[in-house]
Amino acid sequence: MADLTALKDDLTRRMDGALETLRRDFGGLRSGRASPALLEPVRVEAYGGEVPLTQVGSVAVPEARMLTVQVWDRTLVGAVERAIRDAGLGLNPGSDGQIVRVPIPMLTAERRVELAKAAGRYAENAKIAVRGVRRDGMDQTKAFEKKGEIAEDGVKEWSDAIQKLTDSYVKRIDDSLAEKDREIKQV
């Protein structure tokens, strides 16, 4: 006999993954406030390859509009500065010994519109991922029915449960997007 709870747990875990990816994507959107997540996508040319910034230094937020990167290896300070400048984040770092200071500039109206559109794209991608998980759950339900592991009325119950789960995640995504939009417009 197939187990609805196990299926829902698997679908919930996968939908949580889509929501976590959305949070990480939103963290990388510069909203005018300093956040260490802003530098997460930055990769530094070091040690014969590209490595995440967090593997060559530690990121801190000493004030609301400033990030600092304490570079552990003095020879990599220039590479860290270049990587931040070339990451397409609109940031212009400067070094002071082994510390790279990254001032966070004020956002222009055009940049706010761009950020809001990017946030919308990230949210839509998360919804697509959640719907893909729902489709997989529905397919599994139909497969259980074909095998005779659940009855026809059980399929309806399972489908309703999967749809409710999907709707709750889509609402959470919409809520996250609304919060990010407020943050972008507020600063």
Image (tube, rainbow, N blue to C red):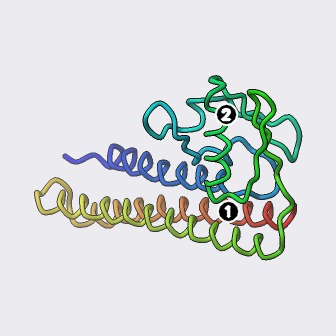
User: Mark 2 belongs to which amino acid?
Assistant: Val
Give the quarter of the image for residue 108: bottom right
Please report the residue visible at 76 percent of the width from the left and 46 percent of the height from the top: 93
State the count of labels: 2
Picture disc at residue 175: 1
Find out whether the residues at labels 2 and 1 contact each other: C-beta distance under 8 Å: no
Give the numbered dot on residue 77.
Answer: 2
Foreground residue among 124 and 144: 124
Q: Residue flagged by tag 1: what amino acid is it?
A: Asp
Q: Residue 182: x and y, percent?
A: 80, 65
**Disc 2 versus disc 1: distance between alpha carbons?**
39 Å
Secondary structure beneath dot 1 equals helix
- Residue 120 lies, in percent from the top left, at 62, 71
The quarter of the picture where residue 72 lies is top right
> In this rendering, would 118 be left or right of 110?
left
Vertical relation: 155 (above or below) 11: below
For marks 2 and 1 on the same chain, the one whose residue lies earlier in the sequence: 2
Q: Residue at x 67, y 64 (%)?
A: 177
- Picture layout, residue 104 above or below residue 73: below
Within 10 Å of the Cα at label 1, are there few (<14), some (14-19), or many (20+) other Cα atoms? few
**Percent x, y for residue 103?**
83, 48
Q: Residue visible at 68% across and 57% down?
A: 89
User: Of helix, strand and loop, which one carries label 2?
Assistant: helix
Q: Nearer the viewer, residue 6 or 1?
A: 6
